[in-house]
Amino acid sequence: MNYKEAMSFLRDTERYGSRLGLDSIRHLMRELSDIQEKIPVVHIAGTNGKGSVGAMLSPVLTASGYRVGRFSTPDVFSYEEEFLMNGVPVEKDRLARLFSDVSEACARMTENGLPHPTRFEVESAAAFLWFYEEQCDIALVETGMGGETDATNLITKPLVSVLTSISMDHMKFLGDTLSEIAAAKAGIIKRGCPVVSVAQRPEAWEVICEKCRREDAKLILADEKSAENPVCTEGEISFLWDMSAFDGRIKCENIYAKKAVSAGDISSRVRITLGLRGRFQLENAVCALRVLELLKERYPNINRSAVISGLKNTRWPGRFEKIGSSPDFYLDGAHNEDAVRKLRATLDLYFPARRMIYIMGVLADKDYVQMIRIMFRDGDRVFTLTPPSPRALSAEELTIRLKRQKIDAVSCANPRDAVSYVLAEAEEEDVILAFGSLSYLSGVRKAFREILE
């Protein structure tokens, strides 16, 4: 199977839809000798932020000298970015071989009368197979949509289960209340395995605490307030952090006591600068740091230098990513109410007195009416696009919805038109933001580059 054939096979699996539950992925991995049980895994679930936490953990662990696999969906700019090894996407030929092996396993299942695995199950299996073949030291695996019935949840003994911000999304599959959604996400918590969670709303926190009690799982709160003296500017986020957990056996000379002392006996608070923009990344960074503190026991090479350099060098395309200047041009995949609320807070912090011009495209199954109410202000100008997805809300319908909220909006036929319009209208001191569904951001970036050329 070559790359073209592999992509054809993958597209064909879309006809099997989405299937909640672990029976199918268990059968599939059994055909692949259950190699997932031999991979050290950090399992990450949440509504927003799980990609950012994984993006931060990867360069720190890589800088520490470990071989780090990462599986994250969806892709934004290239399909191969869903499968990373030390931050580098899998090669197309290698991906084709992986899907070839997985397709043969799927064929054996159907020959035995079992249902064909879904696309996400196939992708998850390919990721596990790649991590195993590459003998990675640690794999960062993100859930797709939920947790308890997510295909990645056949992992039985994660090194740590991570819960990022939980909010209302995918209600059709996960439940109509925050408690129900939190219960689905908390399904990744396993007996006796530690859990790191950011601060959650009370309904979600209660569910997580109860699940940890039942599973005898140690729960560690990644509280944003533990980041001291945070400084958030348009260019960067920085904060003080106690790095004593990463100092190990390093000895420092205490010139006052005239004796050698452990690094933890002197000030270990170090200013950390994040490579990812956006005020909301502070919470994700604290979450990543708490996970790293836990991993330090098993991965002793994690140290102060690796943490500082890894977090500063983190890159995560399409997440408040700056692609142009004069005017400043940003891309962000905020596609639900919670993400848009955090994005709005970042805009208010960074650009309180600057004019904003927007490009927006959303999926029809999102609460786009509430997103509009949170994001926009009187006088805002919005150019709308239809994302390349069967679930997309049309640009025309989105324009109608915006105008009902008294927002000036114009629908565009394609990303090139939208980018041309905003660039023609924007002054040098203005800010352009394309946000909403991740699926259309690659088109905006491509159009922007082509216009500049």
Image (cartoon, rainbow, N blue to C red):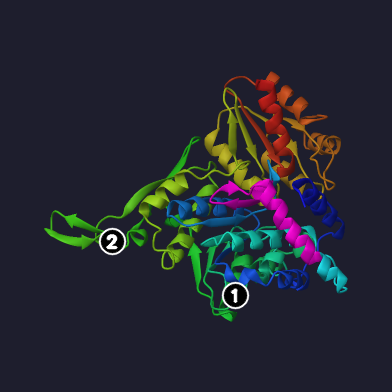
Taking the magenta stretch, the answer to whether it contains residue 89 is yes
- Three-letter amino acid code at disc 1? Lys
Point 57% across, 50% down: residue = 52
Q: Is residue 221 above or below residue 238?
A: below
Stretch of the chain drawn in magenta? 80-106
The C terminus lies in quadrant: top right
At label 2, counting other C-alpha atoms closer than 10 Å, the crowd grade (few under 14, some 14-19, many 20 or more) is some
Q: Is residue 77 magenta?
A: no
Q: CA distance from mark 2 to mark 1?
A: 32 Å
Considering depth in this image, is 335 or 413 the residue closer to the camera?
413
Q: At numbered mark 2, what does the secondary structure look like: helix, strand or loop?
A: helix
Residue at the extreme front of the image, as rendered: 1
Q: Which mark is residue 190?
A: 1
Instruction: Tell me if residue 179 can be seen.
Output: no
Specify whether residue 50 is in view. Answer: yes
Across and down, in percent, residue 244 comes to 33, 59
Q: Main secondary structure of the magenta part?
A: helix
Work out whether 71 lies above or below 449: below
Rendered position, 127 above or below 308? below
- Residue 234, image x, y percentages: 51, 35
Please state the horizontal and vertical placement of residue 72, each as a whole percent of the image: 64, 54
